Amino acid sequence: MRTVAKALRRVAEDKAFAQAEAAEWKRKYEIERARNLQMKHKGHYLCPVIFRDCSYDSEKENSENTKNQSIPSNTENEQEERWCQKNGIYTHEILEDEDVDSHTKFSKKTSTKKALFKLYWGCNGEKNGQHKRDIVSFERGNITTAERSSKQIFLKWESRPRTVLILTKPNSNYVRALCSEMIRWLKHHKNMNVLVEPRVRTELLMEGPEFGFVRTWEHEDEIKHLHTKVDLVVTLGGDGTVLWAASLFKGPLPPVVPFSLGSLGFMTPFQSENYKEYLDTILEGPISITLRHRLQCHVIRDHAKDELDTEEPILVLNEVTIDRGISSFLTYLECYCDNSFVTCVQGDGLILSTTSGSTAYSLAAGGSMVHPQVPGILFTPICPHSLSFRPLILPEYVTLRIQVPFNSRGHAWASFDGKNRKELAAGDALICSMAPWPVPTACMEDSTRDFLRSIREGLHWNVRKSQSFDGPRDS
Ligand SMILES: NC(=O)c1ccc[n+]([C@@H]2O[C@H](COP(=O)([O-])OP(=O)(O)OC[C@H]3O[C@@H](n4cnc5c(N)ncnc54)[C@H](O)[C@@H]3O)[C@@H](O)[C@H]2O)c1
Ligand SMILES: Nc1ncnc2c1ncn2[C@@H]1O[C@H](COP(=O)(O)OP(=O)(O)OP(=O)(O)O)[C@@H](O)[C@H]1O
C-alpha cells in the first residue's frame, strides 16, 4: 500500500512538474512570437517606399578619396513617400530608421543616397510588370486560386546604382587579381563607388596607392548600416562567400551578384571571365532575381528563462543544424511546431533548412531538393535511429522550437550555415522561424532555369545513359 501511495504521489509530482514546464515554455514561446511579430512589422521589403533625389558630388568625393576610408556622404534632398504601386513594389531601403546610430559615420545626416528600384512579377514567363498576389475566388461557390506571387521576380533600377560592395573569398591569388581588375573597371568605366572588407583594402593598398579611392569600414558597428549605403553586392568565391555575404547583413540586403570562383557554385551562376558583360547588363537592368528566404534563430537558455541568448536573431541562408557535436551519445531533441509537440529526434541530429539550403547539408541527410523560390522550412533528421523518420517540408509561417530535454544524456550543438557553434545544455532550446529579410540574388537566366542548371551541372542530377532503341519493343 505504502509503495502504491508513494508511486501515485510521484506521478502527481511529475505531472505538476511537467505542467509547470509546459507553462514556462508557453511563456517563452509567446515572448518569441511577440518578438517575431515586431520584427515582421519592422521588415522593410514590402513596406511603403521613400523616394529621394540621388545627387552626387563626384569631385568632392575624388578629392577626399585618399584621406577618408569610410563610405562617401551626400546631402539629403527631398523625400517622397509612396505606397506599393499597381505594377510592382518600389524600393525604399532608406536607412532613416530611429535605429540608425547618430554617432556613427552612417548617421542620417551623412547618409549616401541609394539607387531606387522597383520589383515586379512576371506572368507566365512574360515580363508584363503586374504584381500578382494570391487570389482566392469563390465564384459559383467553388474555391479557386488564381495568380500567385511566387512568379519570376524582376528588378528594375529607377535611378543609377552608385555603390558596390565587393566580397571576396580569402587566400586566393586568382580572386585577389580579379578583384583589383574589377575595381579598376568599376571606377574608371562605370564611375562607381567601391567598398570592400578592411582586409581587402589593406591588400589593395599594398598593390599601390591608386586604390586609395576604395572604401571600407573601421568599426564592426558600421556593418549594421551597410545596407543603407550599398546598391549592389558582388561576391567573388563559391557558395561559402554567398553565405558570408548574407551573414554580414543581419537585416535587409541589397541585390547580390554571385560570381563563381569556387568548385561547386550552386548559388553562383555568373562566370567571372565575362564579368564586364554581366555587370554592364545588371547595372542597366532589369534583372531577374531569386528572393532566397532566410531563417531567423534564437537560442533560449534554461538558466535565463526570460532572456534570449542574443538580442539579434542569427540569420541563416542554408540551415541551422542541431547535432551531437563531440558527444558520443545519441542526440535527444524534442521538437515543437507552433507550440504543438511534433516528435523526438533520436539520432545524430536535425537540420532546419531553407529551400536554398535544400541542396546543401539537408540533401546529404536525405532531404528533398526544393526550388529556392518555394517558401518553406525543411525538417530533415540526420541519421535517425528509426526506420520511419522521413524528412518533412513545413509551411513558411510556422515557428519551430527544438529543445534539449532534461533527460537527455548529452548536450547538443547548434551551428548556423556551418559556423558559430553554440552548445545547448539540458533545458536550452532553439527557436526558428522564417526571417522577413530574404537574400535577393541576381539570376543568369531566371530562378527556375538557374536552379535546374545547377542541379544538373553541379550535382549531375539523374545522369544516366539513355536506353538504346535497339531491343525489344511494344508491338
Ligand atoms: N555532409 C554535408 O553535405 C555537409 C556537411 C557540413 C556542411 N555542409 C554544408 O556546407 C555549408 C557551408 O558551406 P561553406 O562553403 O562555408 O563550407 P565548405 O567550404 O565546407 O563547403 C561546403 C560545400 O557545400 C556546398 N554548398 C554550400 N551551400 C550550398 C547550397 N545552398 N547548395 C548546394 N551546395 C552548397 C559548397 O559549394 C561546398 O562545396 C553548410 O551550410 C552546409 O549546408 C554540408
Ligand atoms: N570574405 C570572407 N571572409 C571570411 N571568410 C570567408 C569570406 N568569403 C568566404 N569565406 C569562407 O571561406 C570558405 C570558402 O569559401 P567558398 O565556399 O566561397 O570557396 P570554395 O570553398 O573555394 O568554394 P566551393 O565551396 O564552391 O568549393 C567558406 O567557409 C566561407 O565561409
Image (cartoon, rainbow, N blue to C red):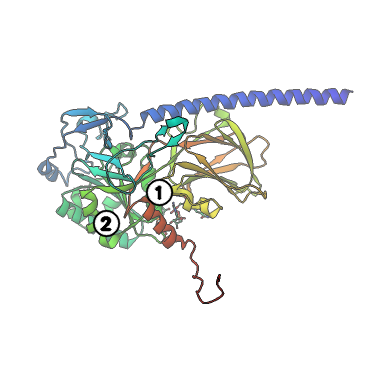
- Say the numbered circle drawn on residue 179: 2
Q: Residue under label 1, please give it.
A: 243
Mark 2: few, some, or many residues within 10 Å (few <14, many ≥20)? many
Question: Whole-percent x and y of residue 80?
Answer: 20, 28
Question: Whole-percent x and y of residue 129?
Answer: 27, 41
- Mark 2 or 1 closer to N-term? 2
Horizontal side of 225 relative to 323 (left or right) equals: left
What residue lies at 42% left-to-right and 62% top-to-bottom? 457
Question: Whole-percent x and y of residue 435?
Answer: 42, 37
Question: Whole-percent x and y of residue 439?
Answer: 36, 43
Dot 1: what SS?
helix
Of 214 and 460, nearer the camera is 460
Of 454 and 279, nearer the camera is 454
Residue at far bottom of view: 470
Residue at far right of view: 1
**Quadrant location of residue 150?**
top left
Q: Is mark 1 within 8 Å of ligand 1?
A: yes
**Residue 416 visible (yes or no):** no
